[in-house]
Image (tube, helix red, strand yellow):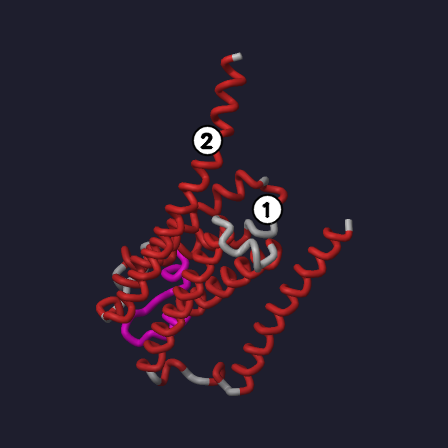
Amino acid sequence: MDNEKSTKKTDLLVIAASLTVLLVSAGLLLSNGLFSMNLTEDAKLTWHLVRSSGIVAYVLLLASTVWGLFISVQFVKDWSPGPVSLTMHSTISWLSLLLGMIHALLLLFDGYFKYTIGDLFIPFAGPYRPEAVGLGTLAFWVIVIVALSFPLKKRLGHANWKRIHYASYAAFGMVSLHGLFAGTEGSHIGLQLLVGVGVLLVVLLLGIRVGKDRIQATPARAALRKTSAT
């Protein structure tokens, strides 16, 4: 009982800390007049904001994916309590979604292509490189589903929750392709290096996770076969 109360307190403290960081960040941005800028007056500014928000969103998604794999392969179990690890994982996922949405909404101010709300949120409907951009849109909705599953974990059950989370790896792959082929920055060595190292790290950790799952499942399968035989 005491452990359960302690866990709840830890969860609340981490959530409160995350919200505090978000509120302070938003307050600083407002006080600096960021949202008073007229983006339509400077097409180059809009272009830079679209690029920078997209890259930051990708870095956050990479961090969330890697951290989730660290949790699942139990790399952090000795120094990061489970509830804190999961809360961090959830918070980073929501931050990635927020930056991804900002990245998309900034396209409404683009001076070269005319985007509508429908173009932004319906996959493969935009006027510019619809296939590559559509992968990012599709990944966004997949990540929304995954993020919403965090508070519903108990209702969904661990097995279903785990299946939903496997979709996040597909979303990460789609966002990686989106980053490389949707914009001109995909030809830059810096972004290529970021995406390449990120994909390699995720694939490596995912391979470790699948290997551990198979090792853990082998005794259970053997026991089930033995029971069936008798």
Q: Secondary structure at mark 1?
A: helix
- Does residue 88 appear to the left or right of 57 in the view shown? right
Vertical relation: 50 (above or below) 131: below
Could you tell me how far apart the alpha carbons at marks 1 and 2 are, in whole angstroms? 26 Å
Q: x%, y% of residue 64?
A: 47, 59
Q: Nearer the viewer, residue 185 or 103?
A: 185
The residue sitting at 38% across, 65% down in the picture is 116
Residue 227 in the image: x percent, y percent? Answer: 54, 18
Residue type for callout 1: Lys
Residue 59 relative to residue 191: left or right: right
Crowding at mark 1 (Cα within 10 Å: few <14, some 14-19, many 20+): some
Q: Amino acid at mark 2?
A: Thr
Q: Nearer the viewer, residue 73 or 159?
A: 73
Per the rendering, the mark at residue 153 is: 1
Q: Quadrant of residue 5?
A: bottom right
Task: Specify start and end residues of the magenta stretch as a single range.
Answer: 105-122
